[in-house]
Image (cartoon, grey):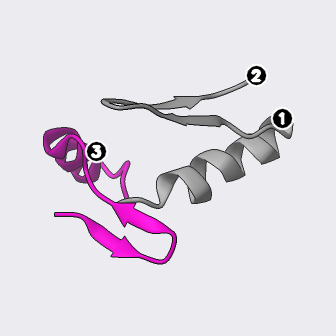
Amino acid sequence: MPICEGAGCRTARNQLLKDVMRDYGYLEHMGLGIPRKIIKGMLEHNGTQPDLVQEEERFIVRLWR
């Protein structure tokens, strides 16, 4: 079920993957990983931001060295 608020909707594309990541402690809150984890971590690590590409059937997060 999508969660819609503010800038957009958060929804799990793969419910099984989301559940496994949550069970192993890799997921704190659905939909917060890109801005709070990935972008923040990349800026701290090498000053870059990822490319976020949304296509018809897929979403790509391209990380730079």
Q: Earlier in the sequence, mark 1 or mark 3?
A: 3
Q: Name the residue at 74% across, 40% down.
A: 49
Q: Dot 3: what SS?
A: helix
Tell whether 57 sits left or right of 61.
left
Q: What residue type is disc 2 on?
A: Arg
Q: What residue type is disc 3 on?
A: Met
Q: Which residue is mark 2?
A: 65
Q: Which residue reaches farthest top? A: 65
Q: Which mark is residue 46?
A: 1
Distance from disc 1 to disc 3, alpha carbons, whole Å, reads 26 Å
Q: Earlier in the sequence, mark 1 or mark 2?
A: 1
Q: Which residue reaches farthest right? A: 47
Q: Name the residue at 67% across, 48% down.
A: 39
Q: Which residue is mark 3?
A: 21
Quadrant containing the C terminus is: top right
Residue 20 is inside the magenta segment: yes
Residue 10 lies in what quarter of the image?
bottom left
Q: Name the residue at 16% across, 63% down.
A: 1
Distance from disc 3 to disc 2, alpha carbons, whole Å, reads 25 Å
Would you place residue 13 above or below residue 36 in this image? Answer: above
Q: Are marks 1 and 3 in contact (CB under 8 Å)?
A: no
Distance from disc 1 to disc 2, alpha carbons, whole Å, reads 7 Å
Q: Residues within 10 Å of mark 2 (few under 14, many from 20)?
A: few
Residues rendered magenta in the picture: 1-27
